[in-house]
Amino acid sequence: MTVNTQPTAERPDPRAYGLPVVRQSEIPAELRSLVSRVHDLIDAVANTEADTETLAEAARTVEGLTAGLNVARRQIGTMVKRDEDLPEEAAEFGTITNIVAGDTNPAAPPLTLHRTPEGLRGEVTLNTVYQGPPGLVHGGWIAAMLDQALGSASSIEVHPGLTARLEVNYRNPTPLFTPLEITSRVDRVDGRKVHVSGEIRAHGKVTAEGTALMILIKG
Ligand SMILES: CCCCCCCCCC(=O)SCCNC(=O)CCNC(=O)[C@H](O)C(C)(C)COP(=O)(O)OP(=O)(O)OC[C@H]1O[C@@H](n2cnc3c(N)ncnc32)[C@H](O)[C@@H]1OP(=O)(O)O
């Protein structure tokens, strides 16, 4: 595999690295439903003031469910192939349990990013699971969402890479329970170094800006 340093339709295939690949459209509706319900469960657990009997019963139930699901576990590094009507050679991949965007991760919001003429764009609304200061998104989570958006810009528009440096400017508080717009783009490509930038906006106002240096993975 060669590493391309200019925008290209070619993508490395994770199967060449021994990583299993699941097509996004083949994730069972039952699993998507479970992920969504556990996402809500995390929020309920984080905020419950139920009585101790209810809590103890819930803990027993969840323990039993966890044991049942652990009977069959995915291989670490399992990838999901996104179905965006792209030709096979331009297919996009992501880790299926990615904490920000993973299809099967109940702890992920999840953040879905789509191509635009300017780069990538996504929308997400966060609940108290992602809370830092009262009513506001945790700063580390803001950095995580920007890392994902900036890394995806490199991956989709140039080639997959790893974040070597990430800088975040927190311009305004980022509110919970508010649609957040996340945008990112590639600014410059210099050999294996890809310079990317992006923003988070609430009600059209920038709450955080990020710039990053991605280093393209070696082929
Ligand atoms: C599948 C799709 C996924 C899309 C979304 C993903 C979003 C999430 C992204 C992440 O969170 S990645 C996880 C967090 N990042 C890491 O764990 C990376 C840890 N660091 C490393 O593994 C290596 O340091 C790294 C791969 C970044 C670079 O090591 P290499 O050995 O491949 O690169 P090398 O040291 O040869 O440097 C290549 C060039 O980059 C430059 N460089 C490397 N690290 C740098 C740095 N930190 N700052 C500035 N420049 C840097 C280096 O000077 C050199 O420049 P020149 O070509 O001009 O000589």
Image (spheres, grey):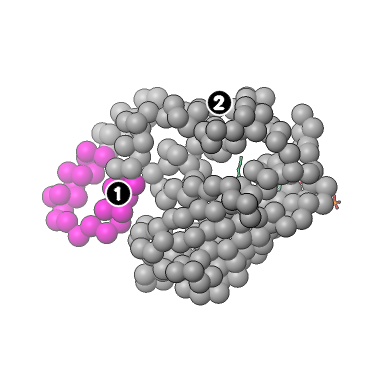
Q: Position of residue 156 (x, y in %)?
A: 64, 43
Observer-nearest of 13 and 123:
123
Around disc 2, counting alpha carbons within 10 Å, would you say few (fewer than 14), some (14 to 19), or many (20 or more)?
A: some
Q: Where is residue 211 in the image (x, y as percent from the top left)?
A: 66, 62
**Residue at which label 1 appears:** 40
The kind of secondary structure the magenta stretch mainly shows is helix
**Is label 1 in a helix, a strand or a loop?**
helix
**Residue at which label 2 appears:** 20
- Residue 166 falls in which quadrant of the image? bottom right
Q: Which residue lies furthest to the front in this view?
A: 117
| Above or below 68: residue 38 | below
Given the image, on which type of amino acid does mark 2 rest?
Answer: Pro
Q: Residue at 72% across / 57% down in the picture?
A: 187
Upstream in sequence: badge 2 or badge 1: 2
Q: Which residue lies furthest to the bottom in this view?
A: 172
Q: Residue at 22% across / 40% down in the picture?
A: 60
Reply yes or no: does residue 55 show up in magenta.
yes
Magenta stretch bounds? 38-62
